[in-house]
Image (cartoon, helix red, strand yellow):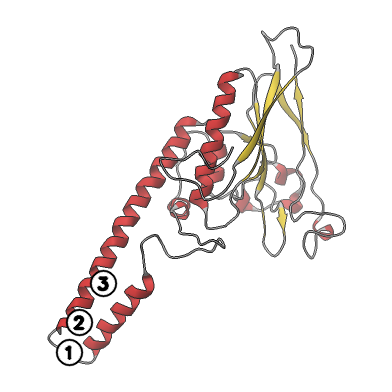
């Protein structure tokens, strides 16, 4: 999957989304019952923390691609894994795992509003919004008012009208962005079904990885200057597919002061899940 596929006419900034493969049992003589195989996807969503809207676009593309495969292979359950670059308290995680309808908090929704990112991935001002110009105009007008100017000069009036115009443009753009996010969220809920996270109850098994913020997910799967959970193994519970166990995560003392180190070659911790796939 690559970014050539657009979402509502918008081209993604990132070059790829995911890989999807279909695994089928060899020498399967009876495909009329049971689970003849499994659909597996692997993804690494856009890494920039502020790019929540871009990641949600990628989630929709991945969901649509998986739906195509599921229509072609209707008896095949799905296992979707990778670095989703979304924490368990983000809207992206809720839309991946929560039953429909998903009700997002105001904070979750606000984080989804599009940001303008430069080529280095930095978060610039909101689209079409120039806060420096607005602040400069407002400051100039305020200074004149504080100086005791009773009647607006032509220059002051012009600056005030420019400021009002800029504010109106920002408000209009914000309203358009709210509508874009709302449409994207609604489409994801309508077109995809929730998945189950293999590590969603891991904190109950290992209390050293517990945090109330992460809803049962490990406190971190990424351990660098920033520590938190970004990686998941998700699956569709189905007849014939059952989760048996997950790999225990290493104690924090082995991870300090940060990853990668001599033992762990990545800045992310490995997640492994064991499934039983019944052939009937």
Q: Is residue 212 left or right of residue 224?
A: left
**Residue 181 in sight from this viewpoint:** yes
The residue most toward the left is 151
Residue position marked by numbered label 1 in the rendering: 149
Please say if 168 is above or below 250.
Answer: below
Residue farthest toward the right in the current orientation of the protein: 262
Mark 3 and 2 residues: CB-CB less than 8 Å, in contact? no
What label does residue 260 carry, if any? Answer: none
For the residue pair 207 and 149, the one nearer the viewer reads as 149
Q: Relative to residue 35, is residue 79 depicted above or below?
A: below
Q: Which mark is residue 156?
A: 2
* SS for dot 3: helix
Asked if the residue at tag 1 contacts the one at tag 2, i.e. Cβ–Cβ closer than 8 Å, the answer is yes
Q: Which residue is mark 3?
A: 163
Tell me if mark 1 has few (under 14), some (14-19) or many (20+) residues whose alpha carbon lies within 10 angstroms of its own. few
Left or right of 106? Residue 86 is right
């Amino acid at each position: 999957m690559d970014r050539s596929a657009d979402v509502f006419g918008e081209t993604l900034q990132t070059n790829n989304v995911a890989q999807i493969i279909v695994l089928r049992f060899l020498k399967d003589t009876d495909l009329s019952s049971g689970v003849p195989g499994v659909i597996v996807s692997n993804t690494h969503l856009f890494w920039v923390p502020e790019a929540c809207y871009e990641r949600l676009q990628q989630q929709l593309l991945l969901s649509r691609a998986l739906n195509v495969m599921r229509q072609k292979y209707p008896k095949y359950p799905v296992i979707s894994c990778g670095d989703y670059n979304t924490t368990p308290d983000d809207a992206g995680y809720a839309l991946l795992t929560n039953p429909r309808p998903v009700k997002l908090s105001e904070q979750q929704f606000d984080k989804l509003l599009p940001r303008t990112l430069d080529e280095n991935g930095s978060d610039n001002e909101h689209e079409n919004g120039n806060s420096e110009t607005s602040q400069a105009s407002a400051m100039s007008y305020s200074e004149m008012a504080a100086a005791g100017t009773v009647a607006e000069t032509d220059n002051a009036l012009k600056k005030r009208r420019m400021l009002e115009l800029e504010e109106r443009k920002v408000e209009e753009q914000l309203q358009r962005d709210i509508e874009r996010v709302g449409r994207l969220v609604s489409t994801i809920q309508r077109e995809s079904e929730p998945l189950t996270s293999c590590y969603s109850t891991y904190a109950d098994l290992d209390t050293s990885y517990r945090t109330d913020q992460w809803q049962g997910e490990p406190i971190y799967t990424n351990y660098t200057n920033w520590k938190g959970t970004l990686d998941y193994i998700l699956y569709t519970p189905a007849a014939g597919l059952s989760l048996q166990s997950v790999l225990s995560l290493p104690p924090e003392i082995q991870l300090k002061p940060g990853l990668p180190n001599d033992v762990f070659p990545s800045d992310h911790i490995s997640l492994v899940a064991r499934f039983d796939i019944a052939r009937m």
